[in-house]
Image: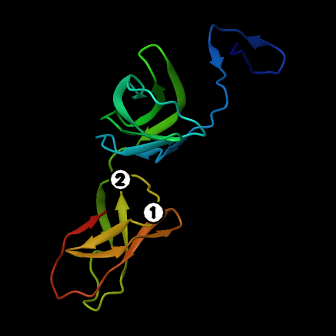
Amino acid sequence: GSARVEVSLNKQEFYTSSVRFTYLPESNWIISPNSGPPHGGTVVIIASTSVEYSSSLECAFDDLVVPAAFVTESQIECVTPAHAPGSASVSIRMTSLESQFVGNFTFEPEVSLRKLSPSAGSTLGGTLVIPELSRPILVSNVSRCLFGNLAVPMLQRDMNVACVSPPHLTSSVSVRLS
């Protein structure tokens, strides 16, 4: 159901409006992963205790509809479309008239590497390098820093990420994040 929202600045007088808040039923759906890039292409698994098979199964990210694949009785899979950065409501459409809200997916802005601190280190490696990024990220077990063609694990350090430079011959190399 929904309820009208009223605001009070003194706990006695309430200002009424036509603004309403909608309460949604608890969802037993899991969306994994629940975030990805705005250019789309993220394979998303939507899981629940029971998923009904439908030959016309679709996923909707806000109003953007994409085909869905029935994986098992508890999972469907779809690929995110391109979408502006921000949160999108995700629904499963069983038919053109029947859909169910399953959760939210966040289209994260692209991450760019602004600078490195420090920007130079020993050829023996071992320099702790902190990349300055365009936005915070969380490190996963597959996050890597590439120094030229040499991949090293990315580390989470407080609210920053870091990498330890690998040994390399004297030269400049490009650094990328993966």
Residue labelled with disc 2 = 134
Quadrant position of residue 57: top left
Q: Secondary structure at mark 1?
A: loop
Label 1 vs 2, first from the N-terminus: 2
Q: Secondary structure at mark 2?
A: loop
Left or right of 169? Residue 84 is right
Q: Check the image and tell me how it is coloured.
A: rainbow
Q: Residue 35 or 15: which is nearer the viewer?
A: 35
Disc 1 or disc 2, which is closer to the eye?
A: 1
Q: Is residue 119 above or below residue 31?
A: below
Q: Residue 57 or 141: which is nearer the viewer?
A: 57
| Number of numbered discs visible in the structure rendering | 2
Q: Is residue 100 above or below residue 15?
A: below
Residue at the bottom extreme of this rendering: 124
Q: Residue 32 or 165: which is nearer the viewer?
A: 32
Return the x and y of residue 94 as percentages of the image width and height.
Answer: 46, 23
Residue at figure coordinates x 36%, y 44% from the top left: 109
* Distance between the alpha carbons at the discs numbered 1 and 2: 15 Å
The amino acid at mark 2 is Ser
Return the x and y of residue 110 as percentages of the image width and height.
Answer: 32, 48
Circle 1 crowding by C-alpha within 10 Å: few under 14, some 14–19, many from 20: some
Circle 2 crowding by C-alpha within 10 Å: few under 14, some 14–19, many from 20: few
Q: Is there any visible trace of residue 108 in the rendered image?
A: no
Residue at figure coordinates x 34%, y 33% from the top left: 84
The amino acid at mark 1 is Val
Q: Which mark is residue 51?
A: none
Q: Is residue 117 above or below residue 101?
A: below
Q: Which mark is residue 139?
A: 1
Q: Is residue 118 above or below residue 143?
A: below
Return the x and y of residue 106 as percentages of the image width and height.
Answer: 45, 40
Residue at figure coordinates x 84%, y 16% from the top left: 12
Return the x and y of residue 69 as percentages of the image width and height.
Answer: 38, 37
